[in-house]
Amino acid sequence: MLQSRDPIRQRSFTRRLVLLATGKLALIGVLGGRMYYLQVVEAERYRTMADENRINLRLLAPPRGRVLDRSGVVLADNQLNYRVVLVAEQTGSVAATLDALSEIVPISEAERRRVLREVARKRKFLPVTVKENLSWDDVSRIAVNSPDLPGVTIDVGSTRYYPFGDKMAHMIGYVAPPSEQDLTGDPLLELPDFRVGRNGVERVYDLAMRGRAGNTQIEVNALGRPIRELSRNEGEPGIDLALTIDAKLQTLAADRLATQESAAAVLMDVANGAVLTLASHPSYDPHEFARGISGASWRALLGNHRAPLTNKAVAGQYAPGSTFKPIVALAALELGIQPEMRVNCPGYMDLGDNRFHCYKKGGHGPVDMVEALMQSCDVYFYEMGRRLGPDRIADMAKRFGLGHTLALDLPGERGGLIPTRAWKMARTGKGWAGGESLVAAIGQGYVLATPLQLATMTARIANGGNAVVPHLTRDFIDGRRVDERTIPPPAPIGVPQAHLALVMRGMRAVVNDPRGTAFRARSLDPAYAYGGKSGTSQVRRITEEERRVGLRKIDQVPWREREHALFIGFGPVDAPRFACACIVEHGGGGSAVAAPIVRDLLVEAMKIEQNRPQNGPAKVAQGPAG
């Protein structure tokens, strides 16, 4: 029995052994196959993953392109930004370190709360910015006290710097951190130091001035802590932007406007439309936005009734007053009205039951067209408006750049308003009234224009009737390089030279004839004589009672009820090269307030041009932004 059982057990044991060996071989085969798959087939993938865990690739923000004036003067640049940072794991107590640091540089309670929030949110070895834009004295004090400030170091970044501050803020604009709407998936926009253009040319040419991002390879340990930098590529700096602006003229304009409560001025080249000055007052400090404006400062800017955030030169819309009369004169000449025809001005004109007054209570007596321009006779132009009607006036005004935007390379430009019969019917559902033609003819009523439009209108009159278009950049950088001197000549407007010459004769007399409204604002040096047209636009209706008892002096009238002061001018008087327009909000008389500003700008522009080399403005070399 026992012997018969042994072979059976032997066979059973052998089968188990074979099965066990087969299973082990299969398992070893599976493991071997898996090892082959991981080490051979997937070797490159896991090698890359290991390198990515060991090497951290970080983007570097490129230097932003500079903004330069027509002669190469820097208007916007990049400046070193010294900041103090704190690493939590290297401090015994973050709160105690902040207390010690606050004795060296001021740290507000809001900054302290922000730092504590970031320390709690981030990993302990990551640096947290405590304060930016430190002065060199601040940096020195922190460095001297570094033994008592564990975990505190000085870091160096870059910030936007505007050498002329608020004098060019509306034109240059400013940069600020990207908003949620700006985030398009581009990782460059998520860098803490990166800024995008928010206003002015900083916004219009933002993409070109950004440049291309660089990168750095950092070796890190298993916890992600940096060990060393392996390589660094600084990227490609943004392109520099050269403007037509003249820094000296712009500074003069800003200083002159600063003597008023609210004002704007534009000066341009009548031949090619280059804008040399574009100033608006009051202004703001662009550095506040670049560094992060406080809530209190933002609310103060928004609450200022003089609108410091508005670029009045391109977005301020005003009744042009008598500065509009040259357009009406040209429309009258085109209709066939003879310039020698005299209109008697007794100080008013009656139309139906309404009386329309001239600013001169006793009237000007009989005047022809040149005299009417020189003395700014309202009654003469009432008569022209009655004969012309709104549509003929509108046609001429639009040819000279009024009633529509001029596509200047700045955001926020507005188009003003030149009314027509069709416009009023569409807007109000009512027909055009005869009296509305009279007030339109003296630049009141529905008529609105911006200082940029008035300067363009003056340039087109002074250059012989060519439709010059204002522009702000000498080098257009939307993918191509075009020097402003290669811009095609402007097309003719279609106004006879004789008509323009006659209107300019009247504008010369405004300033240079003793009977002219702006004779007191003339240039005392004949070499810098100029011509122009004054304007005073009402902001409220003057009642018959006020006319009967006599108008109040300007200092007795609340600021918001005073008339706007305007003036347009060109110079030199016999060979115009520059055109200028100025508006002083609620400034009173145009010849007394705005004309001296225009005079100073035109005279300075003529002096600069006289001393400029004959080959024209220096060409700005495009190079790396600094």
Image (cartoon, rainbow, N blue to C red):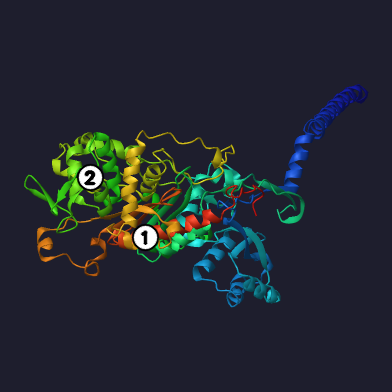
Please give left or right for residue 462 compared with residue 325 in the image: right
Q: Position of residue 192 (x, y in %)?
A: 59, 54
Residue marked by disc 1: 522
Specify few, some or many for label 2: CA neighbours under 10 Å numbering under 14, 14-19, or 20 or more.
many
Residue 168 visible somewhere in the drawing: no
Q: Position of residue 198 (x, y in %)?
A: 48, 50
Examine the rendered structure and indicate whether residue 340 appears above or below residue 535: above
User: Does 404 appear above or below 559?
Assistant: above
- Residue found at the very far bottom of the displayed protein: 103
Q: Residue furthest left?
A: 353
Q: Amino acid at mark 1?
A: Arg
Q: Is residue 175 left or right of residue 148?
A: left
Tell which of 41 and 508 is nearer to you. Answer: 508
The quadrant of the picture occupied by the C terminus is bottom right
Of pointers 2 and 1, the one earlier in the residue sequence: 2
Q: Residue at x 63, y 74 (%)?
A: 137
171 or 483: nearer the viewer: 483
Instruction: Give how far apart the Cα atoms at labels 2 and 1 are.
Output: 26 Å
Mark 2 vs mark 1: in front: 1
Query: What SS does tag 1 mark?
Result: loop
Q: Which class describes the residues within 10 Å of circle 1: few (<14), some (14-19), or many (20+)? A: many
- Measured from the top left, where is residue 579 in percent x and y? 41, 50
Name the residue type under label 2: Ala
What mark, if any, has residue 441 been given in the picture? 2
354 and 117: which one is in front? 354
Residue 537 numbered tag: none
Where does residue 21 sit, x and y in percent of width and height? 86, 28
